[in-house]
Amino acid sequence: MELDIHHKTLTTDVITVSNINLLNAPSGAKLVNNYINITLRGESEALKQIDYADISIDVDLSNIANNGIIYAAATVNLPEHTGIVYEVGDYRLQVQIP
């Protein structure tokens, strides 16, 4: 049996995203910062084709019971047509809960 492995060159890009959605947020909840820097990795051509305005972040606050400033998990939403591109890392945003 013969196996050919082709490694595609991946590049990395850090972008600032300000399209952030607070989901299931209690009244008065707000972001401490209105942006987050995320790292994307993927094929160079696929990264070039991304319209960064199409990237959004979801922060689900449905399981948050604390008041004050909390760190909530953030989910990165990439456009489906981007080819091989994915976020690198674990992201959290500070949210002020009244």
Image (cartoon, rainbow, N blue to C red):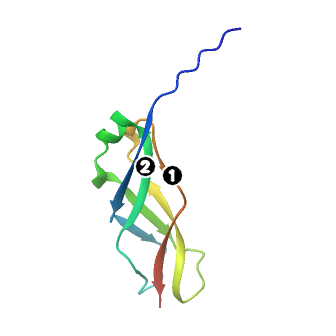
Left or right placement of residue 64 versus residue 39 in this view: right
On the image, the x and y values in percent for residue 22 come to 43, 72
Q: Tell me which residue sits at (40%, 42%) in the image.
A: 80
Residue at 67% across, 9% down: 2
| Residue 82 image-quadrant placement | top left
CA neighbours of label 2 inside 10 A, class few (<14), some (14 to 19), many (20+)? some
Pointer 2: what residue?
Answer: 40
Q: Is residue 82 left or right of residue 70?
A: left
Give the secondary structure at mark 1.
Answer: strand
Residue 51 in picture, x, y percent from top left: 28, 47
Q: What is the tally of numbered marks visible in this picture?
A: 2
Q: Look at label 1 and name its amino acid.
A: Val
Q: Which residue is mark 1?
A: 88
| 27, above or below 93, in the image | below
For the N terminus, which image quadrant?
Answer: top right
Q: Quick one: 7 or 84, which is closer to the camera? A: 7
Q: Residue at x 53, y 21 (%)?
A: 6
- Indicate the position of residue 17 as horizontal and vertical percent values: 34, 61
The correct choice, above or below, for 95 with respect to 13 in the image is below
The residue at the point 40 percent across, 81 percent down is: 32
* Distance between the alpha carbons at the discs numbered 2 and 1: 6 Å
Residue type, mark 2 in image: Leu
Callout 2–callout 1 Cβ contact below 8 Å: yes
Q: Residues within 10 Å of mark 1 (few under 14, many from 20)?
A: some
Who is closer to the viewer here, 1 or 79? 1
Quarter-wise, where is residue 37 in the image? Answer: bottom left
- Seen in the picture, residue 6 relative to 1 is either above or below; the reply is below
Q: Circle 2 — which element?
A: strand
Q: Which mark is residue 32?
A: none
